[in-house]
Amino acid sequence: MDFKELERFLLSCEDAVILAHKNPDGDTLGSAFALCRALRKMGKRANVVCSDGFPERYDFLYEGCEGDNTLIEPKCVIAVDIADVTLMGRNLECYQQEGAVDLCIDHHISNKHYAKQTYVDGSASATALVLYELFRFMNIDIDLQTARCLYTGISTDTGCFKYENTTQKAHIAAAELIGMGVDFSVINRRMFDLKSRSRIMVEQIAISNIEFYFGGKLSMIVITKELMAKSGAEDSEFDGIAAIPISVEGVEMGITVRQRGSQTYKLSVRTTEKHDASEFCRNFGGGGHIRAAGCEISGELSDVRERILELGAKLFGGER
Amino acid sequence: MDFKELERFLLSCEDAVILAHKNPDGDTLGSAFALCRALRKMGKRANVVCSDGFPERYDFLYEGCEGDNTLIEPKCVIAVDIADVTLMGRNLECYQQEGAVDLCIDHHISNKHYAKQTYVDGSASATALVLYELFRFMNIDIDLQTARCLYTGISTDTGCFKYENTTQKAHIAAAELIGMGVDFSVINRRMFDLKSRSRIMVEQIAISNIEFYFGGKLSMIVITKELMAKSGAEDSEFDGIAAIPISVEGVEMGITVRQRGSQTYKLSVRTTEKHDASEFCRNFGGGGHIRAAGCEISGELSDVRERILELGAKLFGGER
């Protein structure tokens, strides 16, 4: 599928429902609402749906779309930023059957091509960047609110232009979008700097429990159920702390251990270029990417820690 | 002074010493080494000096410049990113007298014009961005190492394109610089994500001492000398924690109080768009910017806290 075909699809579609993925982020929501606005501008009815609803954190993306966001009987189903049907979430199960999705627009190279038609640009920093270029191609007027949605998608998926997936095109699109008046510093503060009080406390708990081994090359944070209960924070607030152990200077492998059951522990492993997180996790029946991987280990916490450090000794050698 | 005159200056200068400001950051060092490399490419002798030396954190900027960085007897003194002679630091006192600096290139609108000639672009996100545009104007070949220096200056001064001072030109320059092969994700990880072990501990101490008032609208962190001594961290490692209180959701004014003498406390005040930090600090004889200001209060800690909260009550009203 190319932009010409994508344009033809959008011009001819009617009553579209746009799907965002579960645990929605800035890219899936920014893309979904940008596309929704574009379709409405073309005189069509369009809606956005998400299995987990629309978090307050992203409410600035919905402006101008809230009122009309009643469920329509869709004639056309479009998934944005959803690489696989399993990522739709339990409330969108009806769209997970074969043939249920008419079009998927995505930037994940791993896209499963579950939709009848798929446009994937694996080199794009974000799905919002694909849409930005499509809108340019189609000469769709990008109004300020659409620009905010597109900017947010690009900014959040690149860690504010920080990560390896940031491209020249991402910077050039950002230049044009901020030129339209996007309040990018307010958006970025909200997306990257603001933390809830309980999140701050969770980070403090995590940091106060950090352990270092092998001359500071391996760091580990263990979060037990007891600790979680004491913090008063919700389980989901502990998501993302896996970034903490690897953020310490000199650390080559950062491991976060979270207790799941009474004798089960989930590991999140992050590495610098010196080690393979996926290989480490395969030793415990897990897997993932070279820099970020995961696995589960069963047993008493002391045994779990022992097994991790035994494997660590093979990688880092020397004294603990 | 315009680019034409700036070009003429650089073409005719000989044996240049380039000054970076004290407590050097990515912009002053990135700019200084980029300019140094450009002058050397033009066949001139050039050096960079900084009152505080060159921190290890920025050592990737010095590549290719280290060896030649012996002191030359300068015929020409160029200050980069230094708005005022007081920012040169005690080891560069010899350049603080009137007429000691031949040229200053800067982006601070507050520049004091202490040099014989000054080029200031107050609309530029970074001094490195001024240099990038100058090099383009002069058709100077920007090699990979120079590109790394320029990118680092732009990225660090804009908080990785996050802050209000990020311009379209900053994004476009970044697009061109990363197209030259700059390892921007490695640089950004080092500049923004990596923290020393003691820095992590300092943040933990800060967070564990956070206080909230007026329904969470005012937050305050008090760091006493006793606390600093207990942490084992150096005083300078506490720099930057002023960003923590204002990073909590719902907070409109974040205050960091650091003990200086036995009865003196230094306040760093940060605000959202709802309040004026500078006005707040003027009440205690201080000042600064609308979003970031500072002042000193003398007295017992309990009195200092009381005075802050009394003024806070006028702004936020209601119960503490």
Image (cartoon, coloured by chain):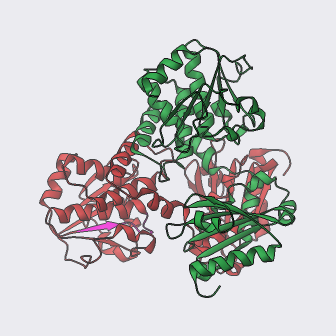
Chain colours: A red, B green
Give the left or right position of residue B252, taking residue A320 as reference.
left
Position in image of residue B260 (x %, y %): 81, 60
Q: In the drawing, does residue B232 fall left or right of residue A235?
A: right
Identity of the residue furthest to the front in this view: B98
Can you say whether A202 is above or below B104 in the image? below
Magenta-colored stretch includes residue B297? no
Q: Is residue A58 above or below residue B54?
A: below
Residue furthest top in the image: B43
Of A7 and A66, nearer the camera is A66
Residue B136 appears at what percent x and percent y? 43, 26
- The residue drawn where x is 24% and y is 51% is A135
- Viewer-closest of B113 and B8: B113
The answer, for residue A259, to whether it is visible in the render is no
Where residue B94 appears, as percent x and y from the top left, is: 75, 29
The tally of labels here is 0
Q: Is residue B136 depicted above or below B45 in this figure?
A: below
At 64% from the left and 15% from the top, the residue drawn is B15
Residue drawn at (61%, 68%) of the image: B280
Q: Position of residue A235 (x, y in %)?
A: 59, 75
Magenta-span inclusion, residue A24: yes
Q: Residue furthest bottom?
A: B319
Q: Nearer the viewer, residue B243 or B101?
A: B101
Q: Which residues are magenta?
A: A17-25
Q: Quadrant of residue B113?
A: top right
In which quadrant of the rendered image does the C terminus of chain B lie? bottom right
In the rendered image, is residue A28 in sight? yes
Q: Quadrant of residue A240?
A: bottom right
